[in-house]
Amino acid sequence: MSADNFGVAGLGVMGRNVALNIERNGFPVVAYNRGDENAQRMRDESVGKNVTVTQSIEELVSLLDPPRRVLLMVTAGAGTDRVIDALLEYLEPGDVLIDGGNSHFPDTDRRAKRLQQAGLHFVGCGISGGEEGALWGPSIMPGGNFEAYERIAPVLEKIAAKTDDDGACVTYCGRHAAGHYVKMVHNGIEYGIMQLICEAYDILRSAAGMSTDQIQGVFQKWTASPKVGGFLVDITAQCLAKSDDQTGDPLVEKILDTAGQKGTGKWTAQTALDLGVPIPTLSQAVNARILSGLKQARVEASGVLMGPGAECEQDRERLVATLHSALHLAMVASYAQGLHLIQAASKEYDFGTDLAEVARIWKDGCIIRSRLLDPIKQAYRQDPEMENMLLHPSFSAIVNESLQDLREAVEIANRGGVATTCLGATLAYLDSYRSEFLPANLLQALRDNFGAHTYRRLDMDGVFHTQWNR
Ligand code: 6PG
C-alpha cells in the first residue's frame, strides 16, 4: 500500500462518493462500512479502481500507512462516537481522524479533547455539495489542529471544487470546532435562502395567481441574474420544470407541504441566541419548517381562522421585478447574518476564522454558492474585522437600492394573506438595524417598573430606578 493512502469509514452515498473522488485524484483508498450492503455497493462502484474495502476496522487501520489519515463519513450523532470508539482501539499517536459529517460543534470539541489525550489529531470538517459535490468537487470546511490540517490539505485541495479564478474550495477554517461551526452556519444560510425562495414562489402563486409553468419561467430567467443567480435558484428552476410521471402535472404540485430537518438550522439559531447575534432570517426559516410540519392543525385552522386573500394589483412584470430585487436584498441579509455569527463565534471560541476565505470557499461546490459570494469575499478582504457586511459600501448600496422593493413585496404578501416568515423577518431586521432609536426605552421602563431592573438614560451617566406607580 502506498504511503499516500487514505482511509474512509462510513460508506453511505456521501462516503462512497468522497472515496471515489479521493481515488480519482490519485490517492489509494482503504474503505470500511459496518453493514455489508454499503460495503458491497462500494465494491461494485470501485471495480478496477484503487479502493480496498475491508471487513473490519482493525483491517482498515492495518492497511493504512502510519501516520494514518481516516475520514469518517458517518451520520452525525451517536454513530460517530461508536466508530471513534472502535478506531481508538487500533489507531496510534500521530494519526489524523477527520469527521466529515454534519456534527454539532460542541461534540467536535469534546471528541477533539478526547483524541488529544490519546495523542491523536482530530479535524472537524464540514463537507457541502450533496452527492454530486462529494463525487466531483465539494466545498470543504476543515478546522482544528493546524498541523493535522496540513497533513490532509494536499488531498482536500485535490478533491475540492475549483473556482475559475479563486483556487480550490477548501481552507483552514480555524482552531477547535471552527470547521463544523462554519458548516453549520452554511446550513443556516441554506435554510434561510431556501425559505426566501419558497416565499417568492408563494407570492407569485398565491397572491398573483401565476401557474407553476409561469413561475418556472421567472426562476429560469433568474438563473442568469448576477443578483440572485446561484445553485439554489438553479435547482428551483429545475424542480419547477419537472413533470409528474403519473399525471403529467408539475411534480411540485403533488408534493406534501411539510418539510423536515436534521438539526443544523436549529443549532445555528440556538448558538446565535447564545452569542446574542441577531439572525432572524435564518432562525425564522427553522420556524417556517416547524410550522410546515403542523399540517393537520393548519388544515383545521384554515377553516376557522380567516385571512384577507386580496389579489395582487401590480402588473406581473413589475411584481417579478420587485420580487427579484427583494430576494436579492434578503439573500444579502442572509449571508450578512451568517457571517456576522461566524465572526462573533470566532472571537468567543478563539477560532481565528478568516471570513474572506469562508466566502471564497463557498463560491463553488457548496449548496449556498451564488454570484454574491465574490463581492462578499472582496469586502471581507478589504475589511477583515467588519462586524456586519451590510455597512460595507458594496452592500449598504444594495440595502438603500432594494429596501423599498422588499417592503413592497412584504406588503403585497401581507395584503394577500401570504406568509412571509423570512422576507418579513428580513425587512424587520433591516429596519431595526438601520434605526438609531428603537422602542427599547419603553421596554427598559417596563422592566424597571415590575422588576426594579434599572435603566440607563440618554442624557446622563449612571444606573437609575424609579417608583413608577407613585
Ligand atoms: C450540504 C447540505 C447537506 C444537507 C443538510 C441539511 O451542504 O451538502 O447542507 O449537508 O442538505 O444536512 O439537511 P436538512 O435540511 O435535512 O436539515
Image (cartoon, helix red, strand yellow):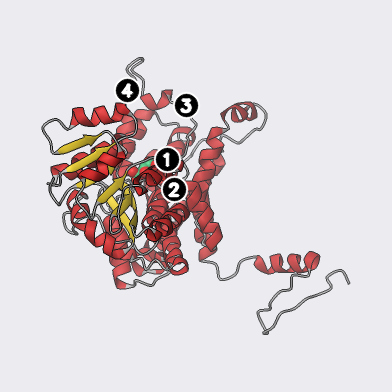
How packed mark 1 is, by other alpha carbons closer than 10 Å (few <14, some 14-19, many 20 or more), is few
| Quadrant hosting ligand 1 | top left
44 sits to left or right of 9? left
The percent coordinates of residue 231 (x first, y second) are 29, 44
Q: Are marks 3 and 1 in contact (CB under 8 Å)?
A: no
Q: Secondary structure at mark 2?
A: helix
| Residue highlighted by disc 2 | 192
Left or right, 361 with reference to 193: left
Inspect the image, locate mark 1, and give the three-letter code of the amino acid beneath it: Gly
User: What residue is rendered at 27% in x and 48% in y?
Assistant: 70
Image quarter for residue 19?
top left
Between 213 and 456, which is closer to the camera in this rendering? Answer: 456
> How far is disc 1 from disc 4 in space, using C-alphas?
38 Å
The Cα atoms of the two marked residues, 3 and 1, are separated by 30 Å
Label 4 with label 3: CB-CB less than 8 Å:
no
**Would you say residue 103 is visible in this rendering?**
yes
Q: Is mark 4 within 8 Å of ligand 1?
A: no
Query: Does the beta carbon of the residue at mark 3 sit less than 8 Å from ligand 1?
Result: no
Between the C-alphas of marks 4 and 3, the distance is 15 Å
Crowding near pointer 3: few (<14 within 10 Å), some, many (20+)?
few
Instruction: Tell me residue 38's x, y (percent).
Output: 29, 30
Q: Nearer the viewer, residue 123 or 434?
A: 123
Tell me whether circle 1 and circle 4 mark residues in contact (CB < 8 Å). no
* Quadrant (top left, top right, bottom left, bottom right) of the C terminus: bottom right
Task: Quickly name the residue at label 1.
Answer: 79
- Disc nearest the viewer among 4 and 3: 3
Question: Label 4 is placed on what type of residue?
Answer: Ser
Q: Amino acid at mark 3?
A: Leu
At x 29% / y 47%, what residue is drawn?
71
Residue 256, which numbered label?
3
Residue 393 horizontal/vertical position (percent): 35, 69
- Give the residue type that dot 2 points to: Gly
